[in-house]
């Protein structure tokens, strides 16, 4: 096993990975920006190296600085966490050239699956269900009109290089197409430096359902069931749960089969998430793949008992899935996660500053992943996620009851948090009944503004 690992991240995920390493007897190296000097990931690592000023581009995204730190500390591997450098194929290539193991898929696979339109075609070749749409990128309005006629309105234009919900436009009729094509192209060019678009059938009121996969470096693949992530605001997930009420054992089995086959064909390695949309007829269609550990991985850990970060490290070290996983994977109970953000619960404005009180809930079936503490600081430079609250119950009703208790006992003073928003969502009848789609938050927030 690796002797020493560098964690190229900050916040709760850095601490999560450091703890996994420590439990496995691996020495740990943290990197940090000047704004994170007093962070827990720095305090709890065996060694910590400052890699630059607060701005992301100057520190956590600064490839030469991260690689220099890894060389100075003489590590065997780098775990990138999520976000930041985790899906950067160039970074993985530099790691390889520097003889440092990147804990994730090889750069070639990240390049294929990280580009949305290429991933779509790869999944199609591997006979996984994709939405009807363009064969490749669409370069002219005429092209777009022709494809839209074939697919049938409504359609959605998406950026080939997309992410974070940008460069997307829903087109409901032919007349709107030219205007929306130009808008999506301009937005994509601006956000990603690449304005190329592709087209898909638009699904009305879909559910967002994703499957966790693990693949070793010997061609073996398993899925660790699904997560339901339809509670999103502006394409950002707020609440995730597993299993999904909409996925029958038969569908789960079929998807698992399809995914194991397609991931093996693509040559996928390490942990990954394959995202789907579910239509009103309960059909699933591939939309994109995330080639890293996800924010919401703990709900899968809760129901399977598998430590996904340790599995990532063991896979990267060349172990086989059969050595890592229990012989039979089963779903036990129900798990739900709330993302606690430092932001105003109604206006959603980010709230940075000094934390003055911090009390986390605990008890049977309650897990909190956070790197915050009383007297900690939320810097204004980074993502607003400050904690993840995960509960695990025998069934969904018990998980909901546990979450309500836990939210009530989660106390943060000094900055605004999304806790009151979560409390309100857990009161909602539609949510409690599990009858929601990706439009839930828009409806929920509109009703609250009226009230
Ligand atoms: P990004 O990479 O920018 O996050 P995704 O392709 O993952 O983009 O899509 C983000 C969200 O946009 C989905 O979770 C869903 O809510 C919505 N969406 C994407 N594609 C479609 C589609 N074809 N039909 C309906 N909604 C879609």
Image: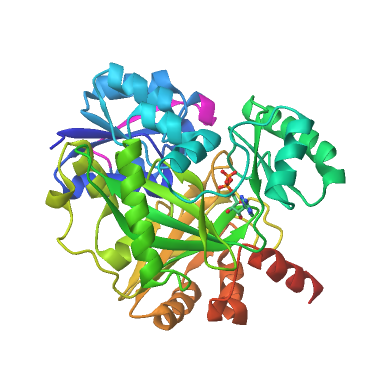
- The quadrant where residue 7 appears: top left
Please provide percent x and percent y for residue 238.
Answer: 55, 60
Q: Nearer the viewer, residue 263 or 185?
A: 263
The region drawn magenta spans 45-57
Is residue 33 visible in the rendered image? The answer is no
Residue 294 in the magenta stretch? The answer is no
Rendered view: 399 above or below 84: below
Q: Position of residue 367 (x, y in %)?
A: 35, 65
Q: Is residue 353 left or right of residue 348?
A: left
Residue drawn at point x = 50 percent, y = 26 percent: 53
Q: Residue at x 60, y 68 (%)?
A: 280
Pinpoint residue 82: horizontal percent, then vertical percent.
Answer: 42, 42
Q: How is the image coloured?
A: rainbow
- Give the left or right position of residue 415, taking residue 95 as reference: right
Quarter of the image for residue 302 reads bottom left
Horizontal side of residue 321 vs 257, given as left or right: left
The percent position of residue 105, horizontal first and vertical second, equals 33, 35
Work out whether residue 297 or residue 18 is closer to the camera in this orientation and state it: 297
Whether residue 57 appears in this view of the structure is: yes
């Amino acid at each position: 096993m690796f002797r020493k690992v560098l964690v190229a991240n900050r916040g709760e995920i850095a601490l999560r990975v450091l703890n996994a390493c420590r439990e496995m007897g691996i020495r740990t190296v943290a990197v940090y920006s000047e704004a994170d000097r007093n962070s827990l990931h720095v305090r709890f690592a065996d060694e910590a190296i400052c890699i630059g000023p607060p701005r992301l581009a100057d520190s956590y995204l600064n490839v030469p600085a991260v690689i220099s730190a890894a060389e100075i500390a003489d590590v065997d591997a780098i775990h990138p966490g999520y976000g930041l450098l985790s899906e950067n194929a160039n970074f993985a290539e530099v790691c390889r050239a520097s003889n440092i193991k990147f804990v994730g898929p090889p750069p070639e696979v990240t390049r294929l699956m990280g580009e949305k339109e290429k991933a779509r075609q790869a999944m199609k070749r591997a006979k996984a269900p994709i939405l009807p749409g363009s064969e490749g990128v669409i370069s002219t309005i005429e092209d777009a009109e022709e494809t839209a006629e074939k697919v049938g309105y409504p359609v959605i234009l998406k950026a080939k290089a997309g992410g974070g919900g940008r460069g997307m436009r829903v087109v409901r009729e032919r007349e709107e197409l030219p205007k929306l094509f130009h808008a999506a192209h301009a937005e994509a060019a601006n956000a990603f430096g690449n304005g190329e678009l592709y087209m898909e059938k638009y699904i009305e009121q879909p559910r967002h359902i994703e499957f966790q996969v693990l693949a070793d470096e010997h061609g073996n693949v398993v899925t660790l069931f699904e997560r339901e992530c339809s509670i999103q605001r502006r394409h950002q997930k707020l609440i995730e749960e597993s299993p999904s009420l909409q996925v029958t054992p038969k569908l789960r089995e079929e998807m698992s089969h399809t995914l194991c086959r397609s991931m093996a064909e693509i040559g996928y390695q390490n942990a990954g998430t394959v995202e789907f949309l579910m239509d009103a007829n309960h059909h699933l269609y591939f939309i994109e793949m995330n080639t890293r550990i996800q924010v919401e991985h703990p709900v899968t850990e809760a129901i399977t008992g598998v430590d996904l970060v340790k599995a990532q490290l063991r896979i990267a070290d060349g172990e086989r899935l059969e050595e890592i996983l229990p012989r039979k994977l089963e779903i036990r109970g129900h798990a739900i996660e709330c993302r606690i953000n430092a932001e105003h619960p109604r206006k959603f404005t980010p709230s940075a500053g000094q934390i003055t009180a911090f009390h986390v809930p605990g008890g049977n079936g309650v897990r909190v992943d956070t790197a915050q503490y009383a007297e900690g600081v939320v810097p204004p430079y980074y993502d607003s996620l400050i904690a993840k609250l995960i509960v695990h119950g025998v069934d969904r009703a018990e998980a909901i009851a546990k979450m309500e208790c836990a939210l009530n006992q989660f106390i943060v003073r000094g900055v605004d948090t999304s806790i009151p928003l979560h409390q309100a969502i857990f009161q909602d009848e539609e949510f409690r009944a599990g009858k929601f789609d990706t439009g839930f938050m828009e409806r929920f927030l509109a009703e609250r503004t009226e009230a």
